């Protein structure tokens, strides 16, 4: 793909946005950044220090951007904290339960947003960046800005299947996180003005990928 294309993708958990983002990056030869993994890695670091994730002051004081080292290779996504690979740890229940509190801390967000912008602007081939505030805050000038969603039942079913977990518990967990993420004061999860909404409830993953690839190609001339 000519020019370094930037594709910004937001959406709630279980919407399929990660699978779509990775696949689109692979198909178009672009880099890929999972910003949720950065907030998760920061949460892991805070918990590893023994700090209570609800102690916003301590979280703000302890957060350091240069510790967080995400991979931008869509074929090998993962993340390191000060060189240690924590790709598995950040998917565990402790981090999942703590991440909404950590990602609501303004100092954490500003560190992560700066790092995300730096990674995107240094990307040679272009990049797919996925998260919650990418279209509105991180990369509002991105030529492709999408909001990928699905109804809550579909999202819970997909997440439960992914994690081999129970649907009811997953759904409760998801709803709790959705509520925390969409009602926080700084950069709540919302559809950014001008972002194109793709509802994947009744779509196969392959259809969503094809649609996003078409949109990206059209945007890139
Ligand atoms: O996409 P995920 O479930 O891995 O995201 C983990 C958490 O990080 C989620 O609860 C919301 C938060 N997050 C955020 O606040 N901003 C982003 N750009 C990405 C994720």
Image: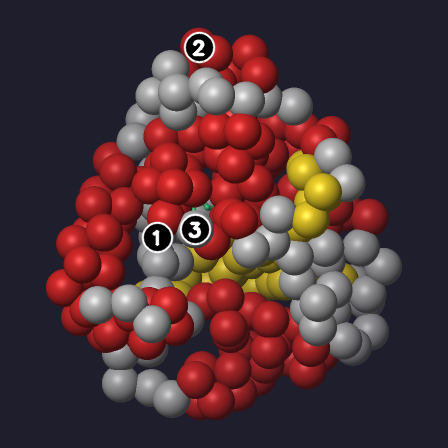
Please report contact status of discs 3 and 2: CB closer than 8 Å, yes or no: no
Q: Please determine whether, in this image, residue 199 is positioned above or below residue 173.
A: below
Q: Which quarter of the image is occupied by the C terminus?
A: bottom right
Apparent side of residue 108 relative to residue 105 in the rendered image (left or right): right
Residue ID for mark 1: 191
Q: Is residue 179 in view?
A: yes
The alpha-carbon separation of the residues under discs 3 and 2 comes to 24 Å
Q: Please determine whether, in this image, residue 218 is positioned above or below residue 76.
A: below
- Residue 15: mark: none
Mark 2 secondary-structure assignment: helix
Q: Please determine whether, in this image, residue 46 is positioned above or below residue 98.
A: above
Quadrant housing residue 25: bottom right
Residue ID for mark 2: 57
Density class for disc 2 (Cα within 10 Å; few <14, some 14-19, many ≥20) is few
Mark 3 secondary-structure assignment: loop
Q: Is residue 221 in view?
A: no
Write the residue at 43% across / 84% down.
205
> 188 or 84, which is in the foreground?
84
Apparent side of residue 119 relative to residue 129 in the rendered image (left or right): right
Task: Name the mark nearer the viewer: 3 or 1.
Answer: 3
Quadrant housing residue 124: bottom right
Write the residue at 43% across / 51% down.
92
Q: Earlier in the sequence, mark 3 or mark 2?
A: 2
Residue 15: image x %, image y %? 35, 67
Residue 77: image x %, image y %? 66, 62
Residue 68: image x %, image y %? 68, 37
Task: Name the mark nearer the viewer: 2 or 1.
Answer: 2
Residue ID for mark 3: 92
Write the residue at 50% across / 42% down.
40
Q: Which quarter of the image is occupied by the N terminus?
A: bottom right
């Amino acid at each position: 793909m000519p020019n370094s294309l930037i594709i910004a993708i937001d959406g709630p958990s279980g919407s399929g946005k990660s699978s779509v983002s990775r696949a689109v990056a692979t198909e178009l030869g672009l880099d890929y950044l999972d910003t949720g993994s950065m907030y998760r890695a920061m949460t892991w670091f805070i918990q590893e220090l023994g700090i209570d994730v609800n102690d916003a002051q301590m979280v703000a004081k302890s957060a350091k951007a240069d510790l967080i080292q995400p991979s931008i290779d869509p074929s090998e996504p993962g993340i390191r904290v000060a060189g240690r690979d924590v790709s598995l740890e950040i998917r565990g229940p402790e981090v999942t339960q703590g991440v909404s509190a950590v990602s609501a801390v303004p100092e954490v967000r500003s560190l992560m947003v700066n790092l995300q912008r730096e990674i995107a602007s240094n990307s040679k081939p272009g990049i797919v960046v996925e998260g919650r505030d990418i279209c509105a805050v991180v990369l509002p000038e991105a030529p492709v800005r999408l909001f990928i969603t699905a109804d809550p039942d579909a999202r819970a079913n997909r997440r439960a299947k992914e994690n081999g977990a129970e649907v009811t518990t997953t759904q409760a967990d998801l709803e709790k996180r959705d509520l925390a993420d969409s009602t926080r004061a700084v950069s709540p999860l919302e559809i950014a003005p001008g972002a194109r909404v793709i509802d994947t409830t009744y779509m196969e993953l392959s259809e969503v990928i094809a649609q996003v690839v078409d949109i990206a190609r059209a945007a890139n001339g």
